[in-house]
Amino acid sequence: MSPRYTALVASLPATVPFVGPETAERERGAPFIARLGANENGFGPSPRVIEAMRQAAGEQWKYGDAQSHDLKQALAQKHGVSPDNIIIGEGIDGLLGYLVRLVVEPGDAVVTSEGAYPTFNYHVAGFGGVLHKVPYRDDHEDPAALMDKAREMQAKLVYLANPDNPMGTWHDAATLEAALERVPEGTLFVLDEAYVDFAPDGTAPRIDARDERVIRFRTFSKAYGLAGARVGYAIAAKGLVAAFDKVRNHFGMNRAAQIGALAALEDAAYLQDITNKVAAARDRIARIAADNGLSALPSATNFVTIDCGADGDFARRVLAETVKRGVFIRMPFVAPQDRCIRVSTGPEAELDAFARVLPEALAAARAPGQVGTGG
Ligand SMILES: Cc1ncc(COP(=O)(O)O)c(C=O)c1O
């Protein structure tokens, strides 16, 4: 006999936001030769971070600091805010779940963009919220339309990622500051800045940490190369930060990860080196696209979205043929963005593999039904 699930859980589909690369490797029966699909940082964390975590390994018998005190102090200093304005959690994904739990009851309206980051939607569905979506405009999320929809639906939350995943596009600080002025009464603006470290100066809006209309999320998963460590944080008004303490998993933070994140913050030179490498890798991916007659969208992230020049079915074939040849990439889920594939930046050897495989994948995608070459 199965447990007596809540009506909400019983109604949920058995879907996950993303199928992980390891799952895909098990399904294909072989490891990938290039891992360019999950917007991880293939250049890895700073050697100083690795050393700090190595030293912490022997202390893993201890729980982590439930308040992440030292990391919180360092982040407060970095952002020029009070530690009371910072909540640390198990990646942005974990914190998004807590946030939704804090404010969304079954039936509550939540607004996002059609085809935007699906993990947020997954949490909203998991707490019974009702998603309302606005289309992208010219491959960008549309801040004004999002705010209008939030007003129309009296939404509890309105979500926007800047820069955006999956398109890699972005808005400047002034546009975001204008959007903030349009947040309707009773709505909380959820600003996801997972990729902002890769964006041009002037992308992050100036927001007073005490502003109760907004919560902004950052992560160590991307620029700091610590996706597997699961460390993210949010900056928000003191009351909202305190509310997380009512629901969060108090000992949810991995001790070595806390220590690694702190060491990462202290290595500014490495961060600069990574952002340079990512920018060079973005250029290389754009060149690979151009060599194959495709165009890359401008990106302020650690990935490049490539327009395959036809419809979603064609891009899905390009993706399948690329993955079949051992190069893990992903693509946007919904039209019209699904005319594209999405390729994460990474070290030269991985991009070499992508450059080698893409022409074959395109040829196979253009001749559906025929068996492609390559292994
Ligand atoms: C827009 C966006 N937000 C959040 C995340 C996840 O961040 P974290 O690893 O901190 O959970 C990602 C990862 O791909 C992302 O693309």
Image (cartoon, rainbow, N blue to C red):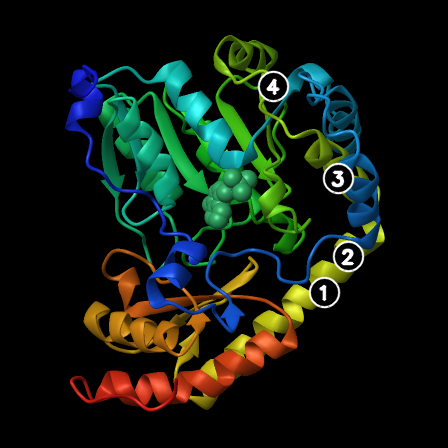
User: Dividing the image into 4 quarters, which one contains the C terminus?
Assistant: bottom left
Q: Which residue is mark 1?
A: 276
Disc 3/disc 4 C-alpha distance (Å):
17 Å
Mark 3 near mark 1, Cβ–Cβ under 8 Å?
no
Q: CA distance from mark 3 to mark 1?
A: 22 Å
Residue 20 x %, y %: 41, 52
Q: Amino acid at mark 2?
A: Gln
Between the C-alphas of marks 2 and 4, the distance is: 32 Å
Disc 2 secondary structure class: helix
Q: Are marks 2 and 1 in contact (CB under 8 Å)?
A: yes
Q: Between label 4 and label 1, give the one nearer the viewer.
A: 4
Q: Which image quarter: residue 53?
A: top right
N-terminal-most mark, 4 or 1: 4
Residue under label 4:
251
- The crowd level at tag 2 (other Cα within 10 Å; few <14, some 14-19, many 20+) is some
Q: CA distance from mark 2 to mark 1?
A: 6 Å
Q: Badge 2 is on which residue?
A: 272
**First in sequence: mark 3 or mark 1?**
3
Q: Quadrant of the N terminus?
A: top left
Residue at image position (57%, 19%) is 211
Q: CA distance from mark 4 to mark 1?
A: 35 Å
Identified by mark 3, the residue type is Gly
* 340 to the left or right of 72: left
- Mark 3 and mark 2 in contact? Answer it, CB < 8 Å: no
Left-right relation of 54 to 240: right
Q: Given contact means CB atoms under 8 Å apart, are the residues at marks 3 and 4 in contact?
A: no
Read off the residue under disc 3. Answer: 260
| Viewer-side residue, 263 vs 168 | 263
As helix, strand or loop, the secondary structure at mark 4 comes to loop
